[in-house]
Image (spheres, grey):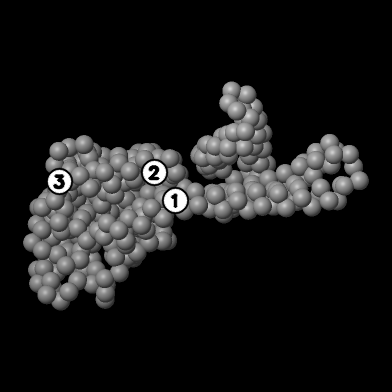
Amino acid sequence: MQNIAIVIPSLNPDDKLLDVVGAVISKGFKTIIVVNDGSDSKYDKYFEHIKKHKECVVLKNYKNFGKGRALKTAFNYFLNTYPNYIGLITVDADNQHHIDDIVNCAKALKTNFLSSNKNNLILGCRDFDLENVPKKSKLGNKITRFVFKILCGINISDTQTGLRAIPIEIVKEFLDIDGERYEYETNMIIDAKQKEIRLQELKIQTIYIEDNKSSHFNPVKDSIKIYLLIFKHFFRFGIVGALSTIIDVGLFTSFMFLFDNLNPKEQIFLSTLIARIFSSLFNYFGNSRVVFNNTANKKVTMTKYYILAALQMSISYLAVFSLSNSLFVIYSTIIKILVDFVLFLLSFQIQREWVFKKL
C-alpha cells in the first residue's frame, strides 16, 4: 500500500496495539505513524517493540493531551515528511477495526484520488443495530445522529468512528480545527460540512472487544465537549435572535415616544416598521458572520433572508389567527409563542441550508 500512511493514536496500550500494527504491516502498508499520547512509562515496552519495524515511526507527546492532539501531532509529521502521499488512514489502537476494512478504506482513497471524488472524507461506519453493540453505544449513537441531522444538517450513520481515510489536501485543512480530545473528531465532521467536503460512508464490521472496555472515552466529560460543539451554532443563532428582539422592542418603544404626536395607527405602524428594519439588519449580519460564517454574495443572501423573513411573518400570522379562532382567545399569546418557536427552529435549518449555504 504505497503512498498511504496509517495513523494510530495510542494511550497506555496493550497487546492489541501490536496486533493492529502487525496486521497493517502484513497487508503491505509501508508507513505507520504511531503516536504515544503521554502513556505511563510502564507501557514503553509496546512502543519500543513497534520501533523495531522499519515501516513504523513512533511520535511522543510529553503528556496526555487527548486523541485530538495526538491526531494533529501525526498529521503535522505526515505533511512535513510525506508531501507526495495521497492521504492517510486513522485507525484506533484497540484492534476494533478489522484489517479488511482498513484495506477497503485505502482502496477507496486510491479510487477517489483518480476521480472527481479526490477530496472526499471517507468514514468507516459501523452498524449500531446489531446485537453485539453495547446498549450505551447504541443509544449514544442514535441520539448523536439525530442531533447532528437536526442542528448540523449532517446525516451519517456513525458519528464517532475512528476509522477515517483522509486525502492529503483535507489533512492540511484539519490541522486548524479546534479540539484536543474526542471532540476533535466531531469537529472534523462539522468542519467538513462547512467547507463543502463530501462525507463518504464505507460500511465496516462492527467489533466490540470486552464491551469496549479499553476505550479511554470519558462518557461525561467527552460527551459534554462533543455536544457543546454540535449545539454551538444553534446557541449563537439563539443569542443573535434574542439580541435582535431586544433591539426591536427597544427601538419600537423609543419611536413610540418620538411619534407621540401622530394618531395611534400611524404611530404604531411607523414604530414597528423602523424598529423591524434595524433589528432585521442586525439579525441578518449577525447570522451571516457570527453563526454561519458566510462569505457569499450579500445581495443574494440578503434577498433570500428577507424572502424567508416575509414568509415566516406571514405563516406566523396565519397560524396564530387560525388557531386562536379555533381555541379560546385567552390562549393567543401562548399560541404565538409556540408557533414562533417552531418557526425559529425551522428558520435555523433553512438559513443554514439555503440562505447562507456556500455556493
Distance in Å between CA atoms under marks 3 and 2: 24 Å
Q: Is residue 156 placed above or below 68 in the rendered structure? A: above
Q: How many C-alpha atoms fall within 10 Å of the one at disc 2: few (<14), some, or many (≥20)?
A: some
> Measured from the top left, where is residue 188 in percent x and y?
37, 53
Q: Point out the tag, 1 or 3, that comes first from the N-terminus.
A: 3
Q: Is residue 292 placed above or below 326 in the rendered structure? A: below
The reply to whether callout 2 and callout 1 are in contact (CB within 8 Å) is yes
Residue 336 visible (yes or no): no
**Which residue type carries mark 2?**
Val
Q: Residue at x 10, y 58 (%)?
A: 16
Q: Is residue 252 placed above or below 326 in the rendered structure? A: below
Q: Secondary structure at mark 2?
A: helix
Q: Secondary structure at mark 1?
A: helix
Distance in Å between CA atoms under marks 2 and 1: 9 Å
Disc number for residue 207? 3
Q: Secondary structure at mark 3?
A: loop
Q: Nearer the viewer, residue 291 or 200?
A: 291
Residue under circle 1? 231
**Which residue type carries mark 1?**
Phe
Q: In the picture provided, is 22 more to the left or to the right than 342?
A: left
- Considering the image in quadrants, where does the C terminus appear? top right
Q: Residue at x 17, y 49 (%)?
A: 97
